[in-house]
Image (cartoon, rainbow, N blue to C red):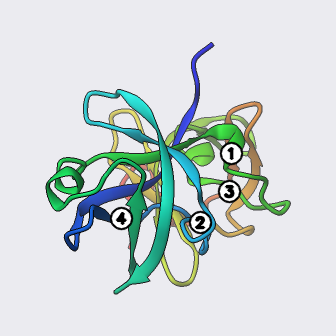
């Protein structure tokens, strides 16, 4: 059985001279790295290795992590571009009505009558609300606000979301109205 990996961070640079790495968090959990002790490193070829975190601190909106076995700037720099991943079982539950982005991306977007609009290609995080980018076959992508008045149902097990677009949100030619 294949392990389902979830990316929680990206190593963007070495930090200092003692082997720490600078990590951009891709996690919604604000304390993900300050409390993390064990995760995995995935390199650009897809190879995954266990990773033990020995220290974590926040510096200028990013994390500086000390990783066991990484003791010099050169060793830390060699990890640039690697992802920090955890198994799907390690991400933890969310409150009811909340979803992980990786659960939403790929879902079929349908109307209440079951007509296929497309598939969720991406989730944009905006200050007011998330926006679902729906990739439609043969038509331009459309942008759907992730609000209850438009997104009527999210059903992860069946692989779909039900969208009730507002009048004029998507016109007859498939072009999105602004």
Percent x, y of residue 163: 66, 52
Q: CA distance from mark 2 to mark 4?
A: 12 Å
Residue under circle 4?
A: 23
Residue 127 in the image: state x and y as whole percent.
Answer: 51, 83
Judging depth in this view, the residue of 10 and 143 nearest the camera is 10
Camera-nearest label, 3 or 2: 2
Query: Please, is residue 11 above or below residue 154 in the view?
Result: below
Look at 50% across and 49% down and name the residue there.
52
Residue in the image at 44% along x and 81% along y: 58
Looking at the image, tell me whether mark 4 or mark 3 is earlier in sequence order: 4
Residues under numbered marks 1 and 4 in contact, where contact means CB atoms less than 8 Å apart: no
Residue 20 left/right relative to 143: left
Q: Secondary structure at mark 4?
A: strand
Residue in the foreground of this view, choosing between 78 and 153: 78
- Of the two numbered discs 1 and 3 in the rendering, the one whose residue sits closer to the viewer: 1
- Do the residues under discs 2 and 1 have CB atoms within 8 angstroms? no
Q: Position of residue 60 (x, y in %)?
A: 34, 86
Viewed as shown, does residue 172 lie left or right of 154?
left
Q: Which residue is mark 2?
A: 32
């Amino acid at each position: 059985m294949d392990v389902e990996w979830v990316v929680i961070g990206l190593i963007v640079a070495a930090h200092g001279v003692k082997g720490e790495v600078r990590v951009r968090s891709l996690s919604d959990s604000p304390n993900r790295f300050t409390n993390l002790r064990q995760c995995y490193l995935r390199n650009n070829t897809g190879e995954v290795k266990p990773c033990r975190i020995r220290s974590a601190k926040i510096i200028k909106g990013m994390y500086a992590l000390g990783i066991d076995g990484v003791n010099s700037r050169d060793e830390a720099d060699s990890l640039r571009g690697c992802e920090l991943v955890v198994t799907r079982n390690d991400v933890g539950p969310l409150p009811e009505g909340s979803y992980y982005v990786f659960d939403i991306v790929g879902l079929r977007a349908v109307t209440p009558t079951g007509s296929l609009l497309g598939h969720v290609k991406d989730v944009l995080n905006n200050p007011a609300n998330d926006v679902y980018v729906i990739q439609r076959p043969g038509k331009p992508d459309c942008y759907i606000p992730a609000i209850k008045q438009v997104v009527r149902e999210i059903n992860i097990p069946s692989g779909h979301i039900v969208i009730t677009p507002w009048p004029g949100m998507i016109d007859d030619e498939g072009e999105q109205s602004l």
